[in-house]
Amino acid sequence: MKKIKVGIIGLGNCASSLIQGIHYYNEKGKDGLIHYELGGYTPSDIDVCLAFDIDKRKVGVDISQAIFSKPNCTTFFNPNIPKYNVLVSMGVVLDGIAEHMKSYEHDCTFVLADVKEPTKEEIIKSIKNSGAEMLVNFLPVGSQKASEFYAECAIESSVGFINCIPVFIASNNEWIEKFKAKGLPCIGDDIKAQIGATIVHRTLARLCEDRGIKILHTYQLNTAGNTDFLNMLNRSRLVSKKVSKTEAIQSNLNKPLEASDVHIGPSDYIEWLKDNKVCYCRIEGEQFGGTPVSIEVRLSVEDSPNSAACVIDTVRCMKIALNKKLCGNIESASAYFMKHPKVQMEDTKARNELEEFICG
């Protein structure tokens, strides 16, 4: 069976965890995965053949080294990565760097490479020359223009597109039609984590409703010290992020809460936490006889490996879609792995539909 050729946009913490994981599961067993084999493919069948970034510590560096370069701060759980013989290419910036990030120490923020940005034609040529079958978008939250640019490059290069960030492409009818017109699949938007804040919050909310609890108020607060959370200190970049995370919870309720009764979103950047994400979740409601009940949860996870566990499956689902010559949004994979899919589904239903998709 042929390798799955993947191009990555943004070689940050999530890309680092994904690439470490590909080699980890080639060497060290099967535990910790949602699927070890998916559609006949194992993690070791994934081959990252192309990467774009804009940081001077990564551009022009072999992928195997660049994933461990600053400002990446995720856990290096598999540091012995063989040389890829693929150098990181300079990408386009557009709105990929928030202005406030220039004021922070270089170790925790992006440092723009002193390299000329490529043209769209040069990006497309690089994609085609690499043999990539799909692009995975790991750009910073709020990179609307940059994400749309790379989505257009995917379409013009005739490759699939996996959108892991909260910019609405695979859930947007206009973009779905663009991919359909070219006979290409897309999956998105905004990757869930294996066991993250959204999936835990959704599950607890669903449990309350199934047991007859009337939910009155709920919040979810998240903190971490990676570039994702530093980037999100600019609240103007969070519009789609808050929509994505809030809809992921509200869609799991029989009757959505009033906007004033639900708060979901990133809370603050704490540098020393690095890639450790800490979530505080609270649900307040009424049970039998109108008596009060509340639930509080503290979740601590390494943020990027948590998302890579879903991306490693999403890549293989994209390969199945390409093999079957499917086009447009892949609903089952989007519903199960993404916070803001085109079609929201209850998690058990999404899992069942995903398994049907995998089995053909």
Image: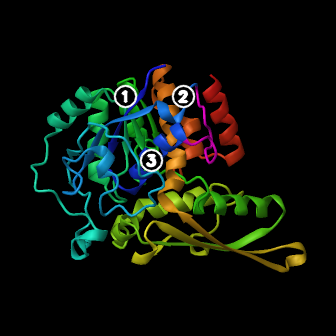
- Residue 34 vs residue 117: left or right? right
Residue highlighted by disc 2: 41
| Nearer the camera: disc 3 or disc 1 | 3
Residue 257, image quadrant: bottom right
Give the magenta-colored segment's residue range. Answer: 28-39
- Residue 221 vs residue 327: left or right? right
Q: Earlier in the sequence, mark 2 or mark 1?
A: 2
| Label at residue 360 | none
| Crowding at mark 3 (Cα within 10 Å: few <14, some 14-19, many 20+) | many
Q: Say which residue appears at 61% left-offset and 36% top-offset.
A: 36
Front one among 263 and 15:
15
Q: Secondary structure at mark 3?
A: helix
Front one among 153 and 56:
56
| Crowding at mark 2 (Cα within 10 Å: few <14, some 14-19, many 20+) | many
**Residue 144 in picture, x, y percent from top left:** 31, 53
Give the residue type at disc 1.
Glu
What colouring method underlies this structural image? rainbow
Q: Secondary structure at mark 2?
A: loop
Q: Say which residue appears at 24% left-offset and 58% top-offset.
A: 95
- Residue 126 vs residue 269: left or right? left
Q: CA distance from mark 2 to mark 1?
A: 15 Å
Q: Earlier in the sequence, mark 3 or mark 1?
A: 3
| Nearer the camera: disc 2 or disc 1 | 2
| Label at residue 133 | 1
Q: Say which residue appears at 38% left-offset and 68% top-offset.
A: 232
Look at the picture and state if 182 lies above or below 186: above
